[in-house]
Image (spheres, helix red, strand yellow):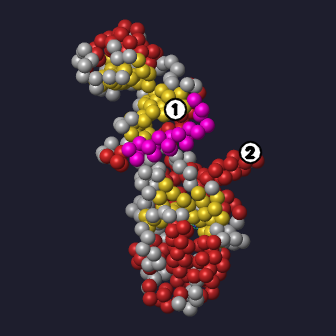
Amino acid sequence: MEWHEILIRYGEISLKGRNRSLFVRKLKNNIKSAMLDLKSIQLHAERDRMFLVAESSDDLQQAIFRLPHVFGIQSFSPVAQCSADLESIQQKAVEVIGSAETEGKTFKVEVKRQDKDFPMVTSEIQREVGGYVLSKFPGLVVQMKKPDIVLLVDIRKEGAFLTSEVIKGAGGMPVGSNGNSLLMLSGGIDSPVAGYQMMKRGMSIDAIHFASPPYTSELAQRKVMDLTERLCSFGASVRLHVIPFTELQQAIVKQIPANLSMTTTRRMMLKVADLVREEIKANGLITGESLGQVASQTLESMTVINEVTSTPILRPLIAMDKLEIIAIAQQIGTYDISIRPYEDCCTIFTPSSPKTKPKLEKVHYYESFFDFNPLIEEAVRNRTVIEASELIEDVEAFDSLL
Ligand code: ATP
Ligand code: MG
């Protein structure tokens, strides 16, 4: 059969009151923007579920491909609707089951009777609908435990809704329903995953990247743009701020002893990021740090780096193993981009043995000989801001050259 309707079930059902209406409103907007080019699609949101209706069945197929990426959806199902009487339900059930392979398959009917005025009880409806379907498809075998096909029938006042397929959604909360933050995005494996994790919790994000031309190349920037574009596919537009970091790094190399220059570099990055965050009115910063992974990611080191700001720094990967992070990167499609070779601004200027337990007093002491603030402000002012729409167009243009 041709489907024209999808039933969307929300995640986070424990949400109450105002939060719920914000959640539903954001989810509706995000689905809408993920389907912008599919002209025949309309959305009808209710308190506890949403319907996506498409006149064109091609549009509906496309929607089925895209919905699993949108946060805030627990699961969804293509549904058929009919009036809430036994005969109509039986006819519709045959149409729905007929759209799948039935020979030798196991099967059961599950009925939810929300309309308590419906003249039959659940077990009766199950029996009547199941019996009718079996009479039309003799190849089916009834099985209560883990059958191949479950026909779900939801009987409500406004009609009966039938479906035989439940597709898993991305879970989480709609992007934009839980504040906004600035993601520090390197070209590595971790930071895109960190951004994804916070988007999954409903945060909208901007990304900031530190580049040190000519020591870092165009290709390194290309990579970060591609990563940002990937993050955009999760139902939100992500803007990218590229910071010219060369002068600050040169000053650091000149002023700070080699074994502390990594610490100061991180501190300066954080100061710049915090100023950009303030300008775009974001609430927090996000990094891809994971405890103990490298010298700058010990608790002692993070404490000294963190000292430059009281802004909350979210580190969703802090307790994760590299292999777990890689598994997510692969699943969300950032891994292949992240492993492209590139020069990171930090690694170029960093000594081979940075301190794992830097002392704050020493860092303050060496930083006190030079006023870094003018360079910090200049870096913020001279940044390049790339809008999500430019990223997407750019990637398409780039791909067409390949
Ligand atoms: P990643 O895989 O995200 O690069 P990493 O394990 O290599 O992380 P570091 O290079 O120490 O760790 O970086 C720690 C965090 O600092 C990164 O996850 C990222 O949030 C931020 N960061 C590092 N380099 C940059 C950069 N060039 N631009 C923006 N943020 C950066
Ligand atoms: Mg890195």
**Contact between labelled residues 1 and 2, with CB atoms less than 8 Å apart:** no
Residue 146 is situated, as x and y percent measured from the top left of the image, at 33, 28
Residue 317 covered by magenta stretch: no
Disc 1: CA contacts within 10 A as few (<14), some (14-19) or many (>=20): some
| Residue matched to label 1 | 42
* On screen, residue 80 above or below 303: above
Q: Give the Cα separation between the discs numbered 2 and 1.
A: 31 Å
Q: Which residue is pictured at 63% across the width and 65% down the height?
A: 242
**Which disc, if any, is residue 400?**
2
For image coordinates 44% across by 78% down, the residue present is 307
Up/down of 289 relative to 91, above or below? below
Which corner quadrant of the image does residue 154 belong to?
A: top left
Does residue 104 appear left or right of residue 109 in this picture? right
Which residues make up the magenta segment? 21-40
Looking at the rendered structure, the kind of residue marked 2 is: Ser
Is any atom of residue 287 visible in this view?
A: no
Note whether ligand 1 is within 8 Å of mark 2.
no
